[in-house]
Image (spheres, coloured by chain):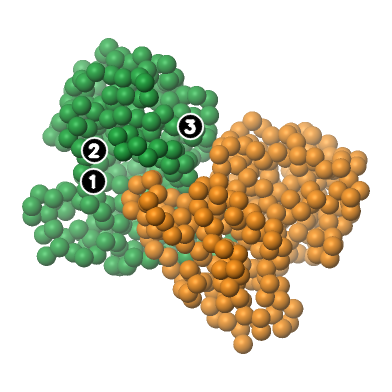
Chain colours: A orange, B green
Amino acid sequence: MASHHTSLINGSFDQTISATDRGFTYGDGVFRTMKIKDGQPVSWPFHYQKLVADCAVIGIVCPSAELLMCDIQLLFPIDEFDNGQVQVVKIIITRGEGERGYAPPAVTIPTRVLIKSAMPTYADAHYIQGVRLHLCDTRLALQPKLAGIKHLNRLENILARMEWRDESIFDGLMLDHDDSVIECTMSNIFARVGKQLYTPDLNACGVAGITRQRILGLEALLGLNTHITTLSLPELFNADEVIICNSLYGAFQVTAIGDQTWEQQTLASTIRNILTHG
Amino acid sequence: MASHHTSLINGSFDQTISATDRGFTYGDGVFRTMKIKDGQPVSWPFHYQKLVADCAVIGIVCPSAELLMCDIQLLFPIDEFDNGQVQVVKIIITRGEGERGYAPPAVTIPTRVLIKSAMPTYADAHYIQGVRLHLCDTRLALQPKLAGIKHLNRLENILARMEWRDESIFDGLMLDHDDSVIECTMSNIFARVGKQLYTPDLNACGVAGITRQRILGLEALLGLNTHITTLSLPELFNADEVIICNSLYGAFQVTAIGDQTWEQQTLASTIRNILTHG
């Protein structure tokens, strides 16, 4: 029997949060999105570790892994997965309710929200050939104190995403204030040059996703040397191969950014295979 | 009979919003805080005009002034104001509910939230002598596409506000990424040098509050020339007089920022008088 519940809030089936929750009034929280397969969150140790780390950056004590796993089991009963279906959970942790004013209350109880959604369907062409990117005009501002974490302040991504409506565009490439390549609106990015695999440094802006982190750990399996570096747009355009990644689709090859194009190659599918089966 | 309702959501007495509201999931919205006196929002034309303009920056169609005035009248019945009491309303406008993903739905219905709170009580010393500021370590990132608007992405202000717990500190002064003075966590700032009154340019970051805007319009009454400019910390420290402002307290003189101090002067009280009675 499939559950008709689509969200769980502080352990209860509910669809609303308090209008005075600081997640709503200030974006004072963090989130993660991950696949649920056979009732279990995929790559959970990576996701939970990242959730704890992101919470810590803004001074929130993350709920325990046990509590969140219990939430996941409530929202995703195992009998929903009989047909091998994959679902998606978004976990949001906020600082909790608060009075007006930026100072957090002396005592806060974090709010935990789980939202269920269907696994997006990606076109076969994305897997086989790859995807096209829009080069966004919206830049990522430099904020070292929030860089790397997936917080609820996402207006830059929204403005960037609003720049295109062409459905043949999969994601938008974002540069920072200093013209460096950083990421896409919902993906991290890698550039391969020969046996070297580069991904942008996210110490001043961007979200350091766990698929990026996992790919950085695949050096030996991929036979590539990985590097976290400053990456300019000309350097990206000169790369032999460009891929993007996130926790839902794994990895896709980039075939075009504006007029710059790349021929179909194999790194993205190799990475997808390793991430899924490795 | 005083209303026991503390919030109004899309015109209904309610205290919760949908967990899939984009204001919650992404901070995709804007807000304003203002005084309510005798059931009427103070400086409403300024606030509503700013709300419309801020919504427009991120592509939200602001609800009509008539609808919001109707909301205010529902939440603040006139008989609550018999004793001359002043209350506070925070008006939040979000893009509305949305599915997972940064792209706004093709059709969105903005969510409007009004939250009632008591007027804060400020110490007599703040009015008579002035206030002390903390110099924040947290910098404001440069983001011209969002500069000036009061959006729901407020993590920088929160991190800045979490830097001090000393109750004798009233607000925190924030510089930008390039070391320019911008604003305080909940206030705008002005520096007077002789007959010149300077306030920072907010084209790359900061919130352009309506009290700042009103003060900029007081040139003739104050006998000062006002300027929007780049302002360094040494320039601020060398000013003859420094004041901060917002819609609730009006204006306060700054008496100290760290070791830098200023003698008690009259500009803040003059401005308060004009803003209240002028």
- Give me the residue at 60% from left, 42% from top: A147
Spatial CA span between label 1 and label 2: 9 Å
Position of A54 compared to A14: left or right? right
**How packed is label 2: few (under 14 Cα within 10 Å), some, or many (20 or more)?**
some
* Residue B173: x %, y % from top left: 39, 30
Which chain is indicated by disc 2?
B
**How packed is label 1: few (under 14 Cα within 10 Å), some, or many (20 or more)?**
few
Q: Eyeballing the image, is B222 above or below A277?
A: above
Which chain is indicated by disc 1?
B
Residue B172 shows up from this direction: yes
Spatial CA span between label 3 and label 2: 25 Å
* Residue B3: x %, y % from top left: 18, 64
* Residue A62: x %, y % from top left: 54, 58
Spatial CA span between label 1 and label 3: 26 Å
The mark lying in front, picked from 1 and 3, is: 3
Residue A36 falls in which quadrant of the image? bottom right
- Give me the residue at 24% from left, 57% from top: B72
Residue A136 shows up from this direction: no
Q: Which mark is residue B137?
A: 3
Q: Which mark is residue B120?
A: 1
Position of A152 compared to A211: left or right? left
- Give me the residue at 51% from left, 65% from top: A113
The amino acid pointed to by label 1 is: Pro
Q: Are marks 3 and 2 on the same chain?
A: yes
Q: Are marks 1 and 2 in contact (CB under 8 Å)?
A: yes
Disc 2 marks which residue? B249
